[in-house]
Image (cartoon, rainbow, N blue to C red):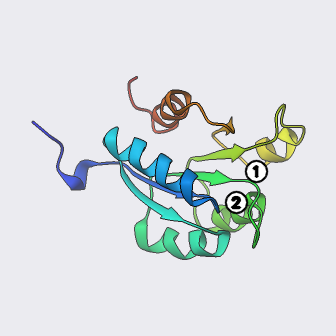
Amino acid sequence: MSESPMEKKRILVVDDEKNIRTLFRDELEEAGYEVATADSGTDALQKLDIFLPDLVVLDIRMPDMTGIEVLEQLRKKYPDLPVIMCTAVRGLKDDFVIWDARVSDYVTKPVDLDVLKEKIRKALGEES
């Protein structure tokens, strides 16, 4: 029996790179999630109230607002919403900023999609 759309967990993918948004959307939809995408921080903040995601995958480096700035705005209204940061920075020298901002987890680019899906399942409290 397949899940009805109402039972699917919702994920908002925020990245300024179209190929990343498309890849993540396709992979996550195939994994059974309902996915919306945003191409900027501003777009993400607008879609949060409309889409009401269960989790956000958020790129750190974007042209209009950084992921950290988006996270700060998001936390004002959705303090408990799981967020997985996505960064091209290896070693993540700024992890103290990220953990202080109450992020569920992070992945580094290029992203291992199986790792991303596992981190999403964990953040949503789903069985792996």
Residue 115: where, in percent of width, then height?
55, 28
Looking at the image, residue 8 sits to the left or right of residue 94; the answer is left
Q: Quadrant of the C terminus?
A: top left
Q: Quadrant of the N terminus?
A: top left
Looking at the image, residue 28 sits to the left or right of residue 43; the answer is left
Looking at the image, residue 39 sits to the left or right of residue 54; the answer is right
Residue 109: where, in percent of width, then height?
69, 39
Residue 20: where, in percent of width, then height?
57, 51
Q: Label 2, secondary structure: give it.
A: helix
Of the numbered discs 2 and 1, the one sitting upstream in the chain is 2
Which residue lies under the disc numbered 2? Answer: 71
Residue lying at 24% horizontally and 49% vertically, measured from the top left: 7
Residue lying at 58% horizontally and 30% vertically, measured from the top left: 112
**Mark 2 residue type:** Leu
Residue lying at 22% horizontally and 54% vertically, measured from the top left: 5
Which residue lies under the disc numbered 1? Answer: 101
Which residue is most to the top? 128
> Vertical placement of 65 versus 113: above or below?
below
**Mark 1 residue type:** Ala
Residue 62 showing in the rendered view: yes
